[in-house]
Image (cartoon, grey):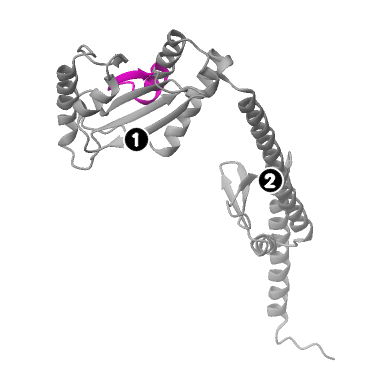
Amino acid sequence: MPIIKSMPVKQVSWSEHYRYLAGKENKLFSWNMSVDPYNEIDITNEFQYNYSFLQSNSKHKNKYYHEIISLPESAKDLSIEESEQILYSLGSKYIDLRAKDNLVIGAIHQDSDKPHLHLIVSANSYLSTKSTRLSKKKFKEVQREVEVYNNLKYPSLVTNHYKENYKAKNKQKRAEQEINRDKRQTKKQKVLHDLKLIFQSSSSKKELYQKVKSKKYQLYQRGKHIGIVDMNDSKKRRYRLNTLEQGLNEKFVKKLKSLEEKQKLQNQVKQQITKEKQLNKGVYYGR
């Protein structure tokens, strides 16, 4: 698995960093540049000119990024040509994901057990006033995509130790997903159970809504679809009634209609009794 590091640079000059990268005999590569990568003055001028567009925006302090892609220990037996080819391939993939429109110059160093590629990446796209800084989340996504690319194209570089760790992590992830799915299922089943009890025990529409509220649920409606919000859940999960149980939406509508009709009938009876009382008020029945 390749190791990728990124470090913002605010003060070191381009020429200083360029000389470190180039060394005496290091092989150089460039992306999105119009000048010879072995010409220090032209390289420096092009980076400086591009940075001048970003300088107008005082928020951005970084001049460029120093980034490193290292091969794993399993690459130590590769020839210089093989490691250069792999590093250039990984570097191109990384730049395509991370800095497709930025100025980039790179140099491969073979002076350690782990061959690595140094990159100078401009802080902004070509002639842009906006920074191309990546968030930690986005940088991790780029790292993962390069990792997948490496594993598919250069499987010999994936060590047994890494494979075992990868399998173990996947196994653990699947187990966690199953546990979370079970928890969600349990919560879903509880909501369904509570709703059914409320439906069965409510004798009026008002009572039904009061019981729903007492259980810390909230009903909502979107068009023809009725749903419920579980306020007991920290994420306040929403469930459509038909996702809790097929046909529950229709049953709920019928239940509400039944309770409304019942309430309407009760109101009519009350009105009739009141009316009769008023008619009979003051009437004397005697001999």
Judged from the image, the secondary structure of the residue bearing numbered disc 2 is helix
Q: Are marks 1 and 2 in contact (CB under 8 Å)?
A: no
Is 126 drawn above or below residue 34 in the view shown? below
Q: Which residues are magenta?
A: 92-109
Q: Is residue 98 magenta?
A: yes
Quadrant that contains the C terminus: bottom right
Q: Label 1 amino acid? A: Met
How far across and down, in percent of the image, does residue 112 sit?
43, 23
Residue at x 66%, y 63% (from the top left corner): 206
Name the residue nearer the viewer: 195 or 13. 13
How far across and down, in percent of the image, does residue 92 sit?
39, 16
Residue at x 69%, y 33% (from the top left corner): 171
Is 123 drawn above or below residue 261 in the view shown? above
Mark 1: give few (<14), some (14-19) or many (20+) Cα within 10 Å: few
Q: Label 2 amino acid? A: Arg
Is 207 placed left or right of 45 in the picture?
right
Name the residue nearer the viewer: 276 or 59. 59
Q: Which residue is mark 1?
A: 7
Q: Is residue 30 magenta?
A: no
Is 38 placed left or right of 252 in the picture?
left
How far across and down, in percent of the image, does residue 19 sit?
23, 23
Name the residue nearer the viewer: 175 or 279. 175
Q: Which residue is mark 2?
A: 184
Judged from the image, the secondary structure of the residue bearing numbered disc 1 is strand
Residue 249, visible in the rendered structure: no
* Foreground label between 1 and 2: 1
How far across and down, in percent of the image, does residue 168 sit?
67, 33
Question: Which residue ends up furthest to the bottom in the rendered image?
Answer: 287
Residue 123, visible in the rendered structure: yes
Q: Give the mark, 1 or 2, whose residue is nearer the N terminus.
A: 1
For marks 1 and 2, give the CA distance.
41 Å
